[in-house]
Amino acid sequence: MPQFDVLVIGGGASGLRAAIAAKRAGASVAVLSKVHPLRTNSALSPGGLNAPLGSDDSAEKFAQDIRSAGDGLCDTEAVNILAADAAREVIWLERVGVPFNRDAEGRIDRRALGSSSVQRAAYADDRTGHMVLHVLHEQFQREDIPCFSEWFVTSLIQDGGACTGAVALGHRSGQLETFAAGAVVLATGGATQLYRPCTSAVGTTGDGLMLAYDLGVGLVDLEMVQFHPTVYSTDRTALVSEAALSEGAQLVNEAGDAVVDAAGLSRAELAAAVHKAGHNGGGPVSLDLRPVADLASRFPGALEVVKSMAGIDASQNPVPVQPVAHRPMGGIETNAAGETSVSGLYAVGECAHNGLNGAGRLPGNTLTEAVVFGKRVGEAAASHARSAGAKEAAGSAARDNERLAEITSGGSSGDTLGTIHRELGELMSANLGVTRTDAGLAEAQDKIRALQQRHAALRVNNKSRIYNYALAGHIELGNLLKLAEATALAARGRAESRGAHLRSDHPEKDDSNWKAHTVVRSQDGSPKLDTRPVSA
Amino acid sequence: MEVTYKINRKDPENGGESGYATYQVDLPEDATVLDGLQKIRDEQDDSLAFRASCCQGTCGECAVRINYKAQFTCTTRIGDVTKKAPEVQLDPVRNISVIKDLVFDMDAFTWDKMAAVKPWMEPDEEFAPTENIVSEKDMADVRKTMSCYQCGLCDEGCAVLPVNFDFLGPGAMVKSYRFVMDPRESGAQMDARMKVVEQPQGLWDCVHCYEADGKCPRGLTPSTKIMEIRDVSFKEGIKNEKVGRHHASFINSVKQTGWLDERKLVMETEGLTNVAGLMKLLPTAVRAMRRGKMPGRHEKRPGADQIKRIIEKAEESK
């Protein structure tokens, strides 16, 4: 049985940063990732990462901007940690190789992004996520940390109340393996595949959230899902960083007239404005990138992706855009050290809720959150593993083996994974989209339950376990459906409009009742909604 | 539109049996090749294996050969590859063993080769209070190179890898170039990397066929980058000891005598104090002698002094 002090699940930016930090803290570490680290969703974060590096900026200003975007739901400790540590982490990234754009003095240049009060986002063209991920992977290799790439985690092991490892299926070997660990870090990314369309990679299926949920850990503020305002989307998506709006790009109607003034708007407000403009009879909204100076050198990634996915030359023509589901703010309930309610189980990055993002993430904070908290959580997990001591994981893969055999017991129900996933995504976009109503949420709950039943009846014909993507896909879709149910419950509960959660039947913010986090826990197999106060 | 997918499949659990399977798929005009693959797995055959992740040309995960040309399935429109006939043929990329269907051994193909060149910085002042001060122009060049997907398409086009899989390949060279041209990189880590890059099956084994340049989806011209690393290698001095001895012996021989003393070259490359290495050469020497291939006396050729002056001139201009 492979045994490590710290087992990191997920090979994106948060997971790699956590693994590097844990290793440097003296722990033996391994990373399990269902795709190779360089193929993770972290690469899809183009715009930049925030750090108060400028003489016009400070940790206090940064914290204030985070709180404004979070619209009352930020927990102070996480905000202060991010604001205080961001500059150090970004400078570390530069020192170990991220080729950030430079200003005239040769220092890290910063661009305006979203509603930040100053130019704060360090950036590498509009491929920041790609560059940061590649450099983190370089440093990960430097630490000589074992990487179990293309391993799909099927369950966590719990022993005496503590998490002591995980069971995973190796795509290449087709074998289930039990990994023992002193501490487990979930860094599995978000669940944007709940929606169709969405901006995120196919693997963002909320696996980590469901692994934690199944151990009784709470999921916080699931209703807070960020919609990105400037995404080309048909069956395919092409995201253009909203940094373009700060550099001259305009949101226009078919006549070419500007329809939305983005200045000072939070991402949620901007998404709502684009949504509204697109639904007021004025025809589709387009992003006109032509006014951007030095477009080809400022936004090479956007030009490339719009060309390949939309077939549009954005240097010549406006690009039709709409708000598209992008990143969740909610996730696994943790404190600022990444600890969950289960001893030895940590969570970080997009799968986690540590109180940083509140009801709306400040654009440019995704990658900063990944590296700042990745480091802290990696160190905390290493420290826990040292005090917990190494032990054999008590669990075995027998239960998982039975579960996989059950899924692959064949027999057609006439349904398909793709059909159920598509129906779920369209339902989520329609009923849990930019705006929501109680009736729509109630309908969603019913339909999600029906989809769950169809999923439960569905079997995979292929019994092989070697690169059986349908088998993994079955588990992923099961995770999404459970998460959808919990998300709809939370969204229905929050009878107010705040941040990314807009209820047309409750258009006002209700601080007296809802300046609080929603928490969904599994009780007797069903999701139960609770609330807890925001910590000042 | 109705499209026939002809897919090269391999079943690792059935004696490695492989062959083409065909599927009829109804797709919208603007569908991608990946859309069709997903539809086949979803509706017709859930055992079909292929890789995909971002589905928007950002991650580099979905490279396969589409009608014999290696490209990404997520950015390739079905309409663009079915102009001649409503059929598309999909094969795994070349030069690498296939695990299942369109899933190939990316570890051996690209990841292990990339890792071999020690692709990371080990800066002296890793936790300095401020960033490095460098020019935007230098960083723009590094960013261009770092936009590399590490998708392996350059290696897929490489003419050397099919005959020598131990060749580092253009992908790992491009990864090296990212450091070689980065003004922030220097010192011991750079030397350690160059020793690997300059190894006999590295930098010098590229045959300049330029195939890799035509394959790179981001236009990174790996062949040109390999040439530039060679220039740097000569300028800075070769760090790989064995290759360094080879070059020194070659130059010395031509400089002193106007032509190449092959006996000396072989021995000096191995190292004159490397007894074990020299002993390994013995059987080859014996065979060469038996067949009359052992070079005879090595004498200075006419015009050798002019050749020497040419070399010295070149060395001065370095």
Image: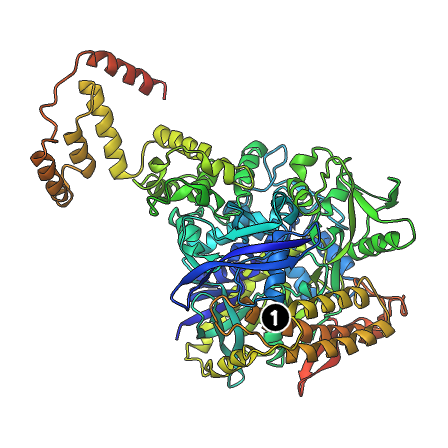
Q: Residue furthest bottom?
A: A524
Q: Position of residue A85 (x, y in %)?
A: 60, 56
Name the residue nearer the viewer: B19 or A198.
B19
Q: Residue at x 78, y 78 (%)?
A: A446
Relative to B194, B46 lies left or right: right
Residue B169 sits in quarter? top left
Q: Position of residue A361 (x, y in %)?
A: 72, 59
Q: Amino acid at mark 1?
A: Glu
Q: How many marks?
A: 1
Q: Position of residue B74 (x, y in %)?
A: 61, 51
Q: Residue at x 81, y 65 (%)?
A: A430
In the rendered image of this protein, does residue A141 appear above or below residue B220?
A: below
Q: Residue at x 41, y 80 (%)?
A: A392
Q: Which residue is mark 1?
A: A476
In the rendered image of this protein, does residue B67 appear above or below residue A443?
A: above
Q: Is residue A338 visible?
A: yes
In the rendered image of this protein, does residue B274 appear above or below residue A475?
A: above
